[in-house]
Structures are given as C-alpha cells and as structure tokens.
Image: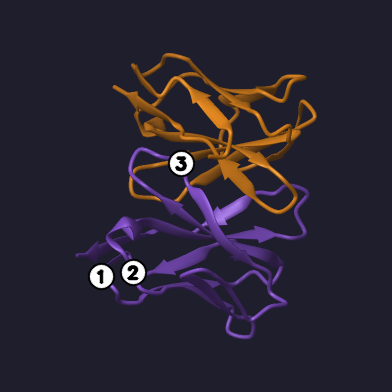
Chain colours: A purple, B orange
Amino acid sequence: QQQVKQSPQSLIVQKGGISIINCAYENTAFDYFPWYQQFPGKGPALLIAIRPDVSEKKEGRFTISFNKSAKQFSLHIMDSQPGDSATYFCAARNGSSNTGKLIFGQGTTLQVKP
Amino acid sequence: ETGVTQSPTHLIKTRGQQVTLRCSSQSGHNTVSWYQQALGQGPQFIFQYYREEENGRGNFPPRFSGLQFPNYSSELNVNALELDDSALYLCATATRETQYFGPGTRLLVL
C-alpha cells in the first residue's frame, strides 16, 4: 500500500527523442507526486510535481501525465538531450500523514545517446 | 542549488562504531528530514524533525537517532554500525509541499 512502483529500470534514448518513465501506486491517500532527477554523486533535485486534481503539468521539456483512476503517473522528457542522462525517481506523499515524508520509486537510469 | 549542505561528504567506519552526520540549510525551513539511499535504490525516509522535535519516523531501528538545533541545523547519529548501513545519507529541508535535498554523505561501513 505504501509502495510506488517505477518502470523501466533503465532506458536508452537517442538525442531528440522522447523519454517516458512510468510509476504506479496503490494508496489513494497519496496527494502529491514529485519527480526528482539525480546525477552521480549528487542529491536528488526536484524536477516537476503534480497534484491528483490535475491530469497534466508541463514545465519546459518535462511533462507529468496523471491518471487518477488507474493510479498511474508518468514523466515525459521531450527532445531528450545528453545532459538529461541521470537517474529519475518518482515519489508520492501521503496526505494523511503529519510529515512531508516521500515514498520513492526504485529509480530509472536514463542514458541519452548523442 | 537547494542551499542544503551536508558534512562530511564521505566517511569510512568499521562495524560497531558510531557516526554523526551533519546538515545545515540556508532556507530557514523549520523542518528537516533524513533519508537513506542504498546503492541503486530510491531514498528511504528515516525520520523528520520539526522545531527540534521528532515528528515522524520510518522503518529504522532506534540506533538511528537525530537532533535538530534552534538554527534548524540537524544531526543524524547511527550507533553500532552494521555493514548494511553503507549508503548515501540525504538531508532535506521540507516545506508542506516537498523536500529539497542536500548532496548527501556517503558512508561506507567495513
């Protein structure tokens, strides 16, 4: 119930292509869904986030699509660039919790080939 | 940059020892969380401090403890280190919305 399942584990995309990473959850108490980008040796950096009352959010080349009924959400990276090569984590927060605790997916390692 | 700093950046300890990791933030946020990130895994919530009190804890044993100071800086203490404690330890300042992470401390337990 507290898990967030992320796929694929790794992804290779050509420069200019679209990268798509998917996440699924079970707990309907989750009310906030951020995506983090992590480069080797660095901490995760917030990329984009969405609430379940919105089906899509776009910021530059990054888009979150959210399907509340299916309990799934995905990150789309348009015009993928070699600099996007990193590990991406989806996460979810339980709105009924008194903390901002985030539950993370297992991560997707993205490689964008020049 | 999140303005969250952690020290040290790397640390090597032996099994059974104790370790203290430190975190500070320029954000002024009064909430700090600690996460453990094992190699190839997503971060796992250890605990959160709000106004110097622990107000939430993940599935970690009592040998993981923490402190938050009046200036909102924080420490993570781990006693009786085990090999499985080898990981990246992340500190994050938290708003109600989300967590902003520091660069982490890489701990290796031999």
| Disc 2 and disc 3 in contact, CB within 8 angstroms | no
| Disc 1 and disc 3 in contact, CB within 8 angstroms | no
Q: CA distance from mark 1 to mark 2?
A: 5 Å
Among numbered discs 2 and 3, the one appearing first in the sequence = 3
Q: Secondary structure at mark 3?
A: loop
Camera-nearest label, 2 or 3: 2
Give neighbour class at mark 2: few <14, some 14-19, many 20+ (Cα, 10 Å). many
Among numbered discs 1 and 3, the one appearing first in the sequence = 1
Give neighbour class at mark 1: few <14, some 14-19, many 20+ (Cα, 10 Å). some
Q: Chain of mark 3?
A: A
- Return the mark for residue A15: 1
Q: Amino acid at mark 1?
A: Lys
Q: Which residue is mark 3?
A: A43
State the image coordinates of residue A1 (x, y, percent, origin top left): 60, 66
Q: Chain of mark 1?
A: A
Camera-nearest label, 1 or 3: 1
State the image coordinates of residue A96 (x, y, percent, origin top left): 77, 59
Q: CA distance from mark 2 to mark 3?
A: 21 Å
- Examine the rendering and report whether any part of residue A95 can be seen: yes
Query: Hey, which quadrant is residue A83 in on the image?
Result: bottom left
| Disc 1 and disc 2 in contact, CB within 8 angstroms | yes
Q: Amino acid at mark 3?
A: Gly
Among numbered discs 1 and 2, the one appearing first in the sequence = 1
Q: Secondary structure at mark 1?
A: loop
Q: Looking at this view, name the residue that lies furthest to the left.
A: A114
Q: Which residue is mark 2?
A: A80
Report whether A25 appears left or right of B19: right
Residue name at image x 66 percent, y 23 percent:
B73
Q: Chain of mark 2?
A: A
